[in-house]
Amino acid sequence: MSVSPISGPHRPGSGTHCRTCSLSSLCLPLALEAQAMEEFDAIIKRRAPLVRGESLCRQGEPFSQVFTVRSGSFKQVVLDHEGEEQITHFYLPGELMGLESIEEGSHAGFIIALERAAVCEIPFHQLDVLTERLPALRNQLYRCMSRGMGEDRRLIRLLTCKSADERMASFLLDLARRFERYGYSPATFRLPMSRTDIANYLGLVLETVSRILGRLQQQSLIALKGRELHILQPEALYQLSESSHCHGNPALSRSRG
Amino acid sequence: MSVSPISGPHRPGSGTHCRTCSLSSLCLPLALEAQAMEEFDAIIKRRAPLVRGESLCRQGEPFSQVFTVRSGSFKQVVLDHEGEEQITHFYLPGELMGLESIEEGSHAGFIIALERAAVCEIPFHQLDVLTERLPALRNQLYRCMSRGMGEDRRLIRLLTCKSADERMASFLLDLARRFERYGYSPATFRLPMSRTDIANYLGLVLETVSRILGRLQQQSLIALKGRELHILQPEALYQLSESSHCHGNPALSRSRG
DNA sequence: CGTGATTTTGAAACGGGTCAACGCAGGTGG
DNA sequence: CCACCTGCGTTGACCCGTTTCAAAATCACG
């Protein structure tokens, strides 16, 4: 019954090599030539699938590799010293995890599987060395990190400017966009995370998320049963997400050029 | 009267070469050997100082170089299609600007001087090529980007979890930490940005910022006159910043890894 | 010393959080 | 096969922090 990624166009394990992996066009080896891809392929490790709730790495653990999602999905959870938990990111197939931990040298948070999921492990040092010889790979890595920064800034904007409804709308559309990238219908998919997780990520409480989803459903913008989501009116949802009454402050005033 | 960065230990222009620049230990050339630093030095361009309000780059403009702050300070402002402005970052001396624009190929936002300020321009393509031969430089670049991501995640946590007072406290301490890095007293400095800018950045309104600063002053945690700030009780401020009643949601439940 | 920008202060309205009760499904064991 | 439990999601009533609106005070600068 569930529209899990497993049943989608990109099957996990549909290739134990980058060359045959259906995700390679979204992943780091993008734009690598055959020879280069083999070299890249040689340094990455495929690891046994994780089950729901299992963690890929723990906060504070020494950093030595980054990961890409082959199938399933993950959340990054960071714990502050008071033990408060905060979800800073959800990861879908083809996405790179762990880049924010390079500088610290230890993992910035837990990375936890939201469902049965598989990853590729990429030892960072070997990747670094390889980027020396493969400009295309280096470039792709720069771009991935840059994209990560851009996405974070977008989330920051969302959190500072937007009301609860706008956040929810943005969140759903962002997921849709990413699922589409992965080869699924952007209109119909299964939310991999719980309401609680959504709330935590968006800086809301569970009850608010629940109420908003109910409201969106009443207005027929979406149809939702459990975690099965249909986006019925994407443009209306988009408009909602951009209602943007960011407490108007002229940050650009007096700019001269 | 004003404790502007100009009068501090690191003087702008105190070296028109990386070798003699007092910021080199904070900047990209960190850890480069003499020979490597010369090579790096050769690709960067120093440009005439900007005046307050002048913009270093405009949103949407083609991306070709990143910048480091030599003196003064900047804000990054991004405009959404409704014309709403959002400050996503403040930059102090020694900090790298523009990294989030690599992927898009065009600048993600305006970068605007908050006061008289000077920068180094680093053509990205040349930097990329140089990182091929200089592992230490490549590593530093990866680390800079990774640090940027980490900082953004921290801001995200701040925005989702924290109350207005906690945000303000975190913000002031963050500035203090960065000024300290730059060689100034972390207890006494001049806020380079307006109350409006602070509000915009923290997702609050001007009035709230003003009230909170007033309250902090009443409680003698800080002393503030115009933009001149003294942090009187840093540890108390820190405690305040971590009161963290993040609407407790168990994001880590059932982890088995 | 005046004029506009910036900041402070006050009173009232509202969005979202808190608390508490209820509904619903899936699993377990008698 | 059904009663029970447990995890998850929904709904309602009330409350608090932050925004909104309005106006006064202070500052920067020609």
Image: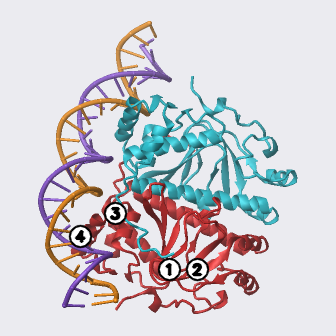
Chain colours: A cyan, B red, C purple, D orange
The relative height of residue B112 versus residue A92 in the rendered view (above or below) is below
Where is residue A136 drawn, in percent x and y?
A: 78, 59
Amino acid identity at mark 2: Leu
Q: Residue at x 54, y 42 (%)?
A: A175
Q: Which residue is mark 2?
A: B26
In this rendering, do the residues under marks 2 and 4 share a single chain?
yes
Q: Residue B166: which disc?
A: 3
Sequence-earlier tag: 1 or 4: 1
Amino acid identity at mark 4: Arg
Sequence-earlier tag: 3 or 2: 2
Residue closer to the observer: B64 or B195 = B64
Sequence-earlier tag: 1 or 2: 2
Q: Residue at x 38, y 36 (%)?
A: A210
Sequence-earlier tag: 1 or 3: 3
Where is residue B255 drawn, in percent x and y?
A: 52, 43
Are the residues at dot 4 and dot 3 in contact (C-beta closer than 8 Å)? no
Q: Residue at x 58, y 84 (%)?
A: B23
Sequence-earlier tag: 2 or 4: 2
Quadrant in which residue B146 is drawn: bottom right
Where is residue B117 drawn, in percent x and y?
A: 50, 83
Residue closer to the observer: A186 or B184 = A186
Q: Which residue is mark 4?
A: B215
Which chain does the numbered disc 3 sit on? B
Instruction: Say which of marks 1 and 4 sits in front.
Output: 4
